[in-house]
Image (tube, coloured by chain):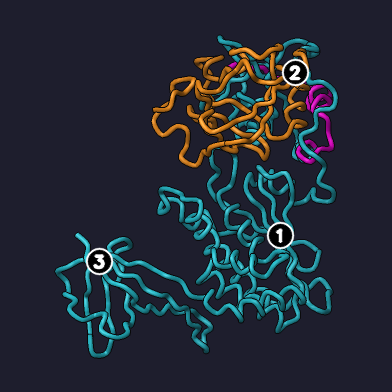
């Protein structure tokens, strides 16, 4: 009998995918093990594996040999090609030969104690999982709905901007194609009884090596809210995300401080070997908040626009430019005579602005204010 | 002009691959001393193997680990378990190629140049 499988995740790679996961058309997981590779063909042996046993394997609690010696369904499959789909045939013998079995003692990785839940969710969603736990001073496993809503919103904004900044630092070529909402937005799907613990999953694209691209943003969030030994190094780290990320982080910290809330940020992704945890308690929130208040320039950002001026008022020092890259208009202010001699509509310019993020007091929404710094004509 | 040990496609190695100058990695060996066959990529070993999740560029690289225990763990898998437990210590310098961390922490893909001296690879 032929079973059609689709490769879903490579677990161990050594010149070839040595162990990978595949799914059949009803979503059952199959673990696939390379048993031979030569110039003519590759041979894999596969067996169905339940989510529970798979999570035990991923979590280093089950020996690979046991999975093949005592399969949950007494059936093995064999196949030789891994194209778009895998056509696996039933292994017709009663037992697997010793040469097809791994040696005792192959465990996937060191055991992650007490992290089965987030690990299982990662396997189920095949993407990054975030647990955002919020607790107040009562610590009675509930939290004010308004506070929860605000914190989740601010966290999402920080994640979005951290992701964007991290991508720029990684020198990604086609940023436009990658900076799309599915890659940085999270979706809530469950909660659990540990403070108020919101479970979120990512739908971000997984790269060739099994990394979920949202990990850039998640790691950045840990970096700017984690422990730090030197204030100077921490400020340097904050400078990598200056602008919207910092202004939203300030708001988040203020929310935590004003309402005596504690935030626990935990995440795991398919390709990770450890669960990442950052806790922002009152002391840490205050420590970071104080640094952000001292280093005011962190909320500022520089921005380039390239395009033609739609309107210029030299006397008032105001301008409006059509930015070719995103096909939007931006307006701002200019000091001194920097606008003197600028031609409207017919000449393209590249301008450098200082972006200052202001908070509108009533709505708490942000507005970017652009102060023109330098201007040059472009072809 | 870089003299790669096998033919690479355009945009391979990826642009984020880096120069592993003075870094040490580990790779399994079939025999001692190491020979050219210990440095065969997937594509060299099996010209027709194709995987949905593995690019042609990766299939022309060599797997190396920066953690010897993770390298030794591979010896428990069926394809490697009957091999002698020989591990090469791959000491790379500028000119030996480019590497990129791929798939899992501690695992790297190495695009080798002919500059790397196979015969001088220590076996441990």
Q: Quadrant of the C terminus of chain B?
A: top right
Please state the chain letter of the residue tagged with numbered disc 1 in the rendered image: A
- Look at the picture and state if A8 lies above or below A66: below
Q: Do labels 1 and 2 share a chain?
A: no
Q: Which chain is orange?
A: B
Q: Is residue A61 left or right of residue A334?
A: right
Please state the chain letter of the residue tagged with numbered disc 3 in the rendered image: A
The region drawn magenta spans: A57-80
Q: Quadrant of the N terminus of chain B?
A: top left
For disc 3, the marked residue is A307
Could you say where residue A140 lies in the image, as x and y percent from the top left? 84, 74
Q: Which of marks 1 and 3 is in front?
A: 3
The circle on residue B92 is none
Q: In this view, does A183 lie to the left or right of A100?
A: left
Circles 1, 2 touching at the beta carbon (< 8 Å): no
- Look at the picture and state if A8 lies above or below A168: above
Callout 1: SS: strand
The image quadrant of residue B93 is top right
Q: Can residue A286 be seen in this view?
A: yes
For disc 2, the marked residue is B86
For disc 1, the marked residue is A131
Could you say where residue B81 lies in the image, as x and y percent from the top left? 77, 17
Q: How crowded is mark 3: few (under 14 residues within 10 Å), some or many (20 or more)?
A: many
Q: Nearer the viewer, residue B113 or B73?
A: B113
Q: How far apart are marks 1 and 2 (CA)?
A: 43 Å
Answer whether residue B99 is magenta in the image: no
Callout 3: SS: strand
Image hue for chain A: cyan
Q: How far apart are marks 1 and 3 (CA)?
A: 43 Å
Please state the chain letter of the residue tagged with numbered disc 2 in the rendered image: B
């Amino acid at each position: 009998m032929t079973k059609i499988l689709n490769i879903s995740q490579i677990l161990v790679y050594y010149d070839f995918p040595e162990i990978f996961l595949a799914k059949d058309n009803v979503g059952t997981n199959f673990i696939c093990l390379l048993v031979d590779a030569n110039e003519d063909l590759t041979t894999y042996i596969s067996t169905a594996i339940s989510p529970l046993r798979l999570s035990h394997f991923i979590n280093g609690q089950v020996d690979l040999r046991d999975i093949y010696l005592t399969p949950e369904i007494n059936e093995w499959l064999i196949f030789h090609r891994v194209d778009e789909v895998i056509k696996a045939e039933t292994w017709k013998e009663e037992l697997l030969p010793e040469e097809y079995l791994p040696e005792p003692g192959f465990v996937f990785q060191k055991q992650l104690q007490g992290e089965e839940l987030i690990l299982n969710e990662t396997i189920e969603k095949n993407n990054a999982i975030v647990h955002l736990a919020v607790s107040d001073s009562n610590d009675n496993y509930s939290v004010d709905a308004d506070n929860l809503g605000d914190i989740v919103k601010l966290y999402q904004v920080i994640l979005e901007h951290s992701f964007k900044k991290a991508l720029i630092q990684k020198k990604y070529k086609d940023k436009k194609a990658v900076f799309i909402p599915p890659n940085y937005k999270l979706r809530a799907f469950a909660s659990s009884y540990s403070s108020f613990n919101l479970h979120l999953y990512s739908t971000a694209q997984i790269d060739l090596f099994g990394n979920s691209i949202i990990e850039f943003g998640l790691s950045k969030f840990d970096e700017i809210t984690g422990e730090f030994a030197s204030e100077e190094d921490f400020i340097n780290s904050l400078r990598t995300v200056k602008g919207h990320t910092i202004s939203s982080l300030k708001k988040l910290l203020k929310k935590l401080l004003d309402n005596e809330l504690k935030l626990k940020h935990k995440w795991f992704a398919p390709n990770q070997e450890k669960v990442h945890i950052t806790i922002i308690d009152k002391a840490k929130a205050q420590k970071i908040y104080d640094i952000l208040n001292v280093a005011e320039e962190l909320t500022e950002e520089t921005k380039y626009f390239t395009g033609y001026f739609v309107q210029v008022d030299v006397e008032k020092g105001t301008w409006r430019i059509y930015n070719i890259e995103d096909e939007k208009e931006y307006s701002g202010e200019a000091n001194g005579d920097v606008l003197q001699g600028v031609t409207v509509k017919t000449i393209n310019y590249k301008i450098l602005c200082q972006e200052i993020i202001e908070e509108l007091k009533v709505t708490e929404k942000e507005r970017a204010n652009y102060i023109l710094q330098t201007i040059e004509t472009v072809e | 002009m870089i003299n790669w040990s096998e033919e690479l496609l355009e945009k391979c190695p990826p642009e984020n691959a880096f120069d592993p100058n003075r870094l040490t990695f580990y790779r399994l060996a079939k025999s001692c001393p190491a020979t050219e066959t210990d440095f065969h990529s997937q594509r060299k070993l099996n010209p027709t193997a194709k995987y949905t999740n593995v690019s042609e560029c990766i299939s022309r690289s060599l797997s190396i680990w920066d953690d010897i225990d993770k390298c030794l763990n591979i010896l428990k898998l069926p394809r490697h378990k009957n091999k002698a437990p020989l591990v090469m210590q791959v000491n790379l310098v500028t000119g030996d190629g480019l590497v990129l961390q791929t798939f899992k922490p501690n695992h790297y893909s190495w695009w080798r140049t002919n500059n790397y001296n196979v015969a001088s690879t220590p076996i441990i």
